[in-house]
Amino acid sequence: MTGILMSDTESKSEIVDVLIAGAGIDGLIAALCLHRAGFSVRVNERLAMLDPIGFGIVLQPLCVKLLYELGLETQLNEIGIDIRKSLYYSHHAQLVYAETRGIDAGYKWPSYSMHRDNFNNFYCIVYFKKHEMHQFI
């Protein structure tokens, strides 16, 4: 059976090609890429449920490229904020540093900012259901 199994309550004895420890950003992306390549994958997460922990994250252009290649461009555009420039100010409101980001910086893909929970829900809901993978608990 090919798919991504993200559960500590079912099929512990099921043999899979790849076992990933942790359903963080890296674990989810690795699982999606490996599944796309035809591997059966199990993601073990110590938490029973992914709670909205943490704050914002920034997806750099090469990460966005990978997500676009997975067919997730439309969904990513819906939940992410396209970052075109980063500005840093002192506590006296003086500009300290500025840099362009994503497409404006010469990349072929944008940079996105979003809340970590939006990113996790994005994968659990949109991608796993779209590809009819095993359940996520």
Image (cartoon, helix red, strand yellow):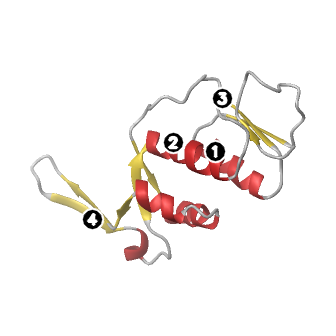
Please, what is the three-letter code of the amino acid marked with disc 3?
Answer: Glu
Q: Is label 1 or label 2 in front?
A: 2
In the rendered structure, which amino acid carries the disc numbered 2? Answer: Asn
Q: Quadrant of the N terminus?
A: top right
* Residue 9 spot, x, y in % from top left: 74, 21
Amino acid identity at mark 1: Leu
Does 102 sit above or below residue 57? below
Q: Nearer the viewer, mark 4 or mark 3?
A: 3
Q: Which residue is mark 2?
A: 121
Q: Which residue is mark 1?
A: 28
Neighbor class of circle 3 (other Cα within 10 Å; few <14, some 14-19, many 20+) is some
Q: Earlier in the sequence, mark 4 or mark 2?
A: 4
Quarter-wise, where is residue 10 in the image?
top right
Residue extending farthest to the left is 92
How far apart in space, not on screen, are marks 4 and 2 (Cα)?
31 Å
Q: Secondary structure at mark 1?
A: helix
- Pointer 1: residues within 10 angstroms few (<14), some, or many (20+)? many
Q: Disc 1 versus disc 3: distance between alpha carbons? A: 11 Å
Q: Nearer the viewer, mark 3 or mark 2?
A: 2
Q: CB atoms at circles 4 and 3 under 8 Å apart?
A: no
User: Which comes sooner in the sequence, label 1 or label 2?
Assistant: 1
Disc number placed over residue 5 in the picture, else none:
none
